[in-house]
Image (cartoon, grey):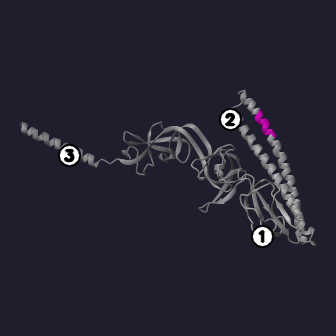
Amino acid sequence: MNAKLLRRTFLAVVILAIAVAVVFALRPTPVLVETGRVRRGPMRVTVDEDGETRAHDRFVVAAPVSGRLLRVPWEEGNAVQAGAVVASIQPLPLGQQQRAEVRGRIAAAESAVYEAEACVRHARVADEQARRDLARAAELARHGIVSAQIAEQARTAQEASGEELRAAQFNARRAAAELEVARSGLLGFANESASPARLTLRSPVAGRILRVVEKSERVVQAGEPIVVIGDPAKIEIVADVLTIDAVNIRAGAPVFLEGWGGDHPLRARVRLVEPWGFTKISALGIEEKRVNVISDFVDPPGPLADGYRVEARIVIWETPEALKVPGSATFRDRGEWAVYVVEAGRARLRRTETGHRNQDEAEVLRGLAEGQEVILHPPNNLRDGMRVRSR
């Protein structure tokens, strides 16, 4: 009796072991996944575009009349003083039509001088008003009537108005120099009976030769550029961004410059979002509406000079502390954002509400807690409740 019971017990244990082995053999293998964590920390949203540096004030010295350009003695990088002779032209004899054209250019240059002087007066009034607004805002902020942010905005507006006033003054000086050049075009027929006159072109400002467009002696037409002058130590950054991104960029926004050749990013600040857009054809042949964003250096530009390439990261939002999740963990499910959370070795679908997003992270507003483990790049065959295993 005991032997028979023992055989039955042994047989039952064997059958149970076989059943357990079959269950484990037929059990689905865990899905191999990559995971990350929901964390708290600083977060920044930027608009990233390629840009280039350029001289803040660039002056193109052009031929005022058609004539024979004598060889330009200057080299790129040479320092020049205001009024220095940068090129010489022997004007060609002018006909009746050309004389009328010269007089027309003189009239246009005179109008440009009047316009530039009016811009200077307007910019000076705006700068004085900005200074008064800054003084009032600082006084109100000191008494706690307005926030420090309003005072900072007034300071930024005053700095911008100051830059606009200086730019207007430079434009007025350039217009005056262009008027002088236009008037010198009369030399082409003032002494037609005498030996050929020599027309000298002078630098309108002190700076450096950025480019010699025409080096050798040859006949040039009126309006052809000859030399480009500027101050390479005073440069700015211009980056063209999509208009849908430009609407979120404000004057005073921080900018970080990368990919310029150094081992650390350089800081800059947005001075101006130009008020007009333009159409640009992308590398894929798509027409895009873009607008230029002009920024000034905060850090010294170092070896950067006119026409250097940079990668501009323009900050449109940032916070020192945010609950964030890796952006690769989020996906759309039935019109909502969702993630897979790892709980007890299984994937659990969690719908969540996100806020700001950048290339790497998404701000979590609802649905997740700090420290939770989430699945990155969830595979298409992953379903709620499936067993998973981290790599």
Residue 337: x and y in percent read 51, 44
**Secondary element at image label 1:** loop
Give the numbered dot on residue 245.
Answer: none
| Mark with earlier residue (1, 3) | 3
Residue at screen point 74% across, 44% down: 160
Q: Nearer the viewer, residue 5 or 283?
A: 283
| Mark with earlier residue (3, 2) | 3
Q: Which residue is mark 3?
A: 18
User: Of helix, strand and loop, which mostly describes the magenta segment?
Assistant: helix
Residue 345: x and y in percent read 36, 41
**Secondary element at image label 3:** helix
**Secondary element at image label 2:** helix
Q: Which residue is mark 1?
A: 217
Give the numbered dot on residue 149.
Answer: 2
Point out the stretch of residues depicted in magenta: 128-135
Left or right of 290 on screen, residue 203: right
Residue 165: x and y in percent read 79, 46
Distance from disc 1 to disc 2, alpha carbons, whole Å, reads 58 Å
Residue at screen point 89% across, 61% down: 183
